[in-house]
Image (cartoon, helix red, strand yellow):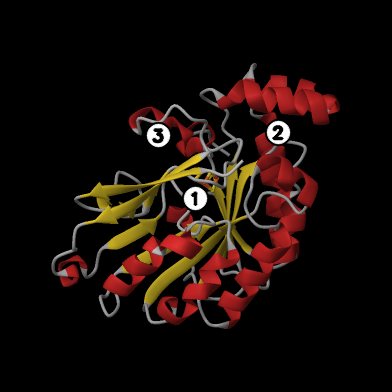
Amino acid sequence: MNPIIKTLEVKNVITKSNLPVCDYSVNPYVGCTHACKYCYASFMKKFTGHDEDWGTFLDVKIWNKIKNPQRYAGKSFFMSSVTDPYNPQEKIYRRTREFLEIFQGVDINLSLQTKSDLILRDLDLIRTFKNIRVGFSINTLDENFKDDMDKAVSIERRLAAMKILHEAGIRTTCFISPIFPGITDVVAIIYAAKNFCNLVWLENLNLRGNFKPKIFAYVREKYPKLLPLYNEIYHKKNLGYWFELHKIVEDYAAKNHLEYVRNRDDMQRDFDAPPVIVNFFFHEQIKNTPR
Ligand code: SF4
């Protein structure tokens, strides 16, 4: 079924952000047709006036002229927090590209996060930013699991795009998120991506909201043997799985001479210095627990 596409006139596409990683977030669209089953942004639906399911609608933002983009020099921007800036419709509507055009020559710190290789279309603009980072979300190498979870391009295409950007001198991140217990092979993904990225960022699956029953139903149907593990983690709040995974990644990093830190503030090394920095993004509950 084709998504329902509308245009939406807005005063501004730049929003002051509470995220620790940026001053502003930029969402050129409302909704996201990648339709990930676990999408944390789906809570947004209640603010959009849409009755349709998350993933089946997209509002294309048309914003007022951004006056004097130079006043944002030195600020950090994240694209995007509640949509994918390179969803398939970006090919037609080019809203992300317009944003990049507006900020040509402005010294902002820009982070782009996507599940699409459509980003390669904008390499001509991307390479003109002095401080830019492109992250690809990859939480499996199994294309069947990927197809069950989202409507974005294949993992193979994401990795190929990451390689092209990396070879073009763009800082890239492999964002392994969300990590599905017993399904996401974190080490295999790091192995596949480590030569094409400057940073590997890990985040565990956090089940909340109305997608928790959906994910449980999926696990029950496709991975019934994992149900006890999911019950242990998501009903009994047992964190043991994440500590074991932490140890596995720590050992892998040590054997492969990769720096591994538990959160971004612990990083000793510059992003650009080889080898890859492996960064475990624990959720608060885990982060506050002593080693
Ligand atoms: S790509 Fe991101 S914003 Fe879009 S549906 Fe997936 S998780 Fe949500």
At numbered mark 3, what does the secondary structure look like: helix, strand or loop? helix
Q: How far apart are the alpha carbons under marks 2 and 3?
A: 30 Å
User: Where residue 271 sits in the image (x, y, percent)?
Assistant: 49, 70
Mark 1 surroundings within 10 Å by alpha-carbon count, few (fewer than 14), some (14 through 19), many (20 or more):
some
Q: Position of residue 29 (x, y in %)?
A: 39, 50
Look at the numbered disc 2 and give the secondary structure of its residue.
helix
Residue 23 visible to the viewer: no
Identified by mark 3, the residue type is: Met
**Residue pointed to by mark 1:** 263
The structure residue drawn at horizontal position 57% and vertical position 47%, both measured from the top left corner, is 34
Where is residue 125 drawn, in percent x and y? 41, 78
Going from N to C along the chain, the mark reached first, 2 or 3, is: 3
N-terminal-most mark, 1 or 2 = 2
Q: Is the distance from the Cβ of mark 1 to the nearest ligand 1 atom less than 8 Å?
A: no
Residue closest to the eye, 118 or 129 = 118
According to the picture, the residue beneath numbered tag 3 turns out to be 44
Furthest residue to the top? 236
Q: Which residue is mark 2?
A: 241
Q: Quadrant of residue 45?
A: top left
Residue type for callout 2: Tyr
Disc 1 residue type (three-letter): Asn
